[in-house]
Amino acid sequence: MRITFALAALLFAGTLMAQESSTTSPDYSRPTLLRILSVDHTAQEERRVDFPFGAVRIEGRSTRWLIGYLPFLMPLSGSVNTGRGLGSNFPDPFALTNTQLAYGPRTWRDQRAMSRELRRIESEEKKRAKIKVSPE
């Protein structure tokens, strides 16, 4: 305990010795205050914006962005997180190569039932639709 107190006192005393000991009064003259408080606009880095063909390049102090607006600069399929749900962040290799997947009878029945229901809804909507064409 005594050793830690002595070490802390020694470090504290060392930092006190590093302080400036000024015998003169502080200088609050106008030129000194202007020099201290002025903002040097020339020293600040300005943002650079370039416009190469098909893109916009923005370079700042800590950022570099290249924003492409032509189709050949678009990202590859699956390289961008779309955020559309679990598992949709990666490309589907079967859909990309048009590969048909084998499925069982239950899946086939479910798909047929869904198609039948969609056809029924569409026919009901056609019956309810009232379209009047007036001759001009």
Image (cartoon, helix red, strand yellow):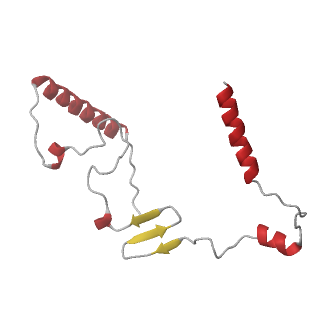
Front-lying residue, 51 or 69: 51
- Say which residue appears at 33% left-offset and 37% top-offset: 127
Q: Is residue 19 above or below residue 130?
A: below
Q: Along the line of sight, which residue is nearer the eye, 85 or 133?
A: 85
Q: Position of residue 135 (x, y in %)?
A: 39, 60
Q: Give the left or right position of residue 42, taking residue 105 as reference.
A: right
Q: Residue 92 at x, y = what percent?
A: 21, 43
Q: Residue at x 34, y 37 (%)?
A: 125
The structure residue drawn at horizontal position 32% and vertical position 40%, both measured from the top left corner, is 126
The quarter of the rendered structure image containing the N terminus is top right
- Give the residue at x 67% y 74%: 41
Q: Nearer the viewer, residue 102 or 59?
A: 59
Q: Quarter of the image holding residue 105?
A: top left
> Which image quadrant: the C terminus?
bottom left
Q: Is residue 15 above or below residue 75?
A: above
Give how far across and how far down residue 69 sits, in percent: 38, 67
Q: Position of residue 98 (x, y in %)?
A: 12, 47
**10 left or right, relative to 27:** left
